[in-house]
Image (tube, rainbow, N blue to C red):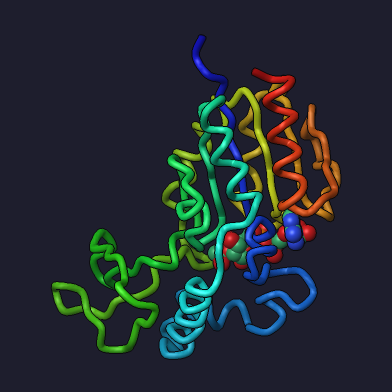
Amino acid sequence: MPKKKLVVLTGAGISAESGLKTFRDAGGLWEGHNVYEVASPEGWYANPELVLEFYNQRRKQLLEVEPNPAHHALVELEDFFEVVIVTQNVDDLHERAGSQNIIHLHGELKKVRSTVYENLVYELPGWELKLGDNCEKGHQLRPHIVWFGESVPLIEDAALHCSDADLLAVIGTSMQVYPAAGLIHYASVQAPKFYIDPQAEPLHSVQNLRCIKQNASSGVPELVQYLKRDFL
Ligand code: OAD
């Protein structure tokens, strides 16, 4: 029997208990920073040093955190389901936990790319990217992050996976940012869907959705047991 396909959409909430701030919760990143100053092309042109510093701090913080039980529980599912993780997160905690198939919709903190040749993407060896750090063709490097106003190159891949999913789980996202928030609509009406978030509420016109108002570190391991028991 082929394995059922489970697509997991994750957001900042899955990494919150690892010690990374979310964006829109009280005390979140967008409370302390102007999103357009640090996460838009206009912000980059106006003040690249501020943008570099913002992402340098995020990258430095990655060295101090570890995957939590929610990231680990998702890895366990790979023995039983074909799992595709579609994450809005730019951290590498799914990778470090050991998940195999991960789509980073909004880019990756540990990568940088040329401001001119966008296919020149590099893994940054340390945490700090500075003005004057150039690509092999001599152009300034920028964070490999999808900023507001930029297109999301991996959205079509992600939508195809969702339309193909037998089961779908949404974990730790406010579902406020499009196009990521629209991905759930690609899943079939029949596919059972689960939304784990302390603030989970039914989503407009999404059927077969069960809201699980829990933190990820307890809610995800429980969901894993439930999926293994009732959906194999
Ligand atoms: P948000 O900050 O918008 O939402 C975080 C969600 O995590 C909220 O719904 C919280 O209730 C939930 N949450 C908090 N603690 C949790 C926990 N312990 N367990 C589970 N859930 C918890 O973050 P995202 O939805 O990920 O984009 O934001 C989407 C995008 O907006 C980000 O990728 C980022 C941001 O602007 C870019 O920077 C391009």
Q: Is residue 25 above or below residue 176?
A: below
Q: How many marks?
A: 0
Q: Residue placed at 25% from the left, 59% from the top?
A: 119
Q: Position of residue 56 (x, y in %)?
A: 45, 81
Q: Position of residue 66 (x, y in %)?
A: 55, 63
Foreground of the two, 119 or 110: 110
Q: Is residue 155 above or below residue 207?
A: below
Q: Is residue 88 above or below residue 28?
A: above
Q: Is residue 11 above or below residue 54?
A: above
- Residue 177 seen by the camera: no
Figure quadrant of residue 14: bottom right
Q: Going by the picture, which residue comes out furthest to the left?
A: 137
Image quadrant occupied by the C terminus? top right
Q: Residue placed at 30% from the left, 65% from the top?
A: 123
Q: Going by the picture, which residue comes out furthest to the top?
A: 1
Q: Position of residue 124 (x, y in %)?
A: 31, 71
Image-based side of 167 in relation to 63, left or right: right
Image-based side of 48 in relation to 31, left or right: left
Foreground of the two, 136 or 43: 136
- Residue 184 seen by the camera: yes
Foreground of the two, 19 or 22: 19
Foreground of the two, 190 or 214: 214
Q: Residue placed at 64% from the left, 44% from the top?
A: 182
Figure quadrant of residue 88: bottom right
Image-based side of 46 in relation to 118, left or right: right
Figure quadrant of residue 122: bottom left
Q: Residue placed at 46% from the left, 52% from the top?
A: 95
Q: Quadrant of ligand 1?
A: bottom right
